[in-house]
Image (cartoon, rainbow, N blue to C red):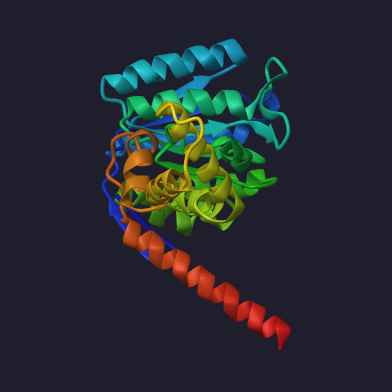
Amino acid sequence: MIVYSDTALTISETLQTNAIVWIHSLPEGEMGPTRRILEDLEGLATAGGFPVFEYAVRDGSELRELFRQLTTRAEQGLRPVLHVDAHGTAAQGLLLAPSGERVGWAEIIEDLRALNVATANNLTCIFALCFGLHLYRHVSLRQPVPSYLFCAPPAEIGVGFLEAQTLAFYREMNRTSNVTAAFEQTLGGVMQSFHCQGLFLQSLLRYIRSYCSGRMRRDRLEHMVTAVLQRDGVANPSGEQLKQVRRQIREALKPGQNVIDFFAPSFLIGRAPAFTYADLDRILKRSVRSGRSQRRLASS
């Protein structure tokens, strides 16, 4: 189960999870905490928790092959919490310590997209590594979301915190089946999370503010007017023709439920959006009012 709140909207959905997939790529001398956590997770699995599948990855080719195998298994029903236990940097991405190879965030996010599509948008990711949140800079509104729920730190994170909170997170998740509540009580002390519905909402707000108003909207309007006239073979349009075409294009560019309906099937991978355009419009109007109030205060 997922319970998520964003910009005064509360989203409650069912998340399918049936396994923990733990990928580690650490130096041998740093494997102590990982082994202790995995032993405890095996104990949880024996007591009725999710089964745990452990994979040691040495280099990029092994990581790519593992993602291909997981994607195939997801097509057959695997719905994992994907836990990545390694080192990372903001600029260079994931460090695969046994080989010293770096795998960039952009490459990893493509593998996650394929895996999440195979899970029908039921993938939870825990990137327990420094700067893991930087991976989500590569999210695009025009492509499938890389996971249903993504959790990672925005900067460095301590091994002591991870050892103390990781098992607590999985215990709480097994006990309540509420992933978001378990995260907030444990790993959320240092990590941040991206929920796909909240990410979709915020991405649409940015899209509407950027492309459906101001200069960008005017530029789009004129470009589309030119394209329509060329399509219709009108080389020297009259004033009335220009007026009519502009009116049609303005109506087409007016944001509405059509914006959500256009992006949702691909981005949410078949999940229904948890909000309507009326919700978006309410948030947009509230932000405009807030901006006006702040400008009045600044000028007083």
**Residue that lies at the very extreme toward the bottom in this rendered image:** 300
Q: Judge whether residue 53 can be spotted in this image.
A: no
Residue at image position (29%, 40%) is 271
Is 249 located above or below residue 289 in the figure? above
* Residue 72, image x, y percentages: 35, 16
Residue at image position (46%, 64%) is 284
Q: Nearer the viewer, residue 185 or 151?
A: 151
Kindly indicate the quadrant of the structure image that contains residue 228: top left
Which part of the image, by quadrant, shows the C terminus? bottom right
* Residue 14, image x, y percentages: 26, 46
Residue at image position (38%, 19%) is 71
Apparent side of residue 193 relative to residue 96 in the rendered image (left or right): left
* Residue 104, image x, y percentages: 65, 25
Apparent side of residue 114 relative to residue 269 in the rendered image (left or right): right
Is 202 located above or below residue 88 in the figure? below
Residue at image position (33%, 62%) is 278
Q: Judge whether residue 90 can be spotted in this image.
A: yes
* Residue 246, image x, y percentages: 44, 48
Q: Nearer the viewer, residue 124 or 209?
A: 209
Q: Nearer the viewer, residue 281 or 233?
A: 233
Figure label count: 0
Is 4 located above or below residue 42 in the figure? below
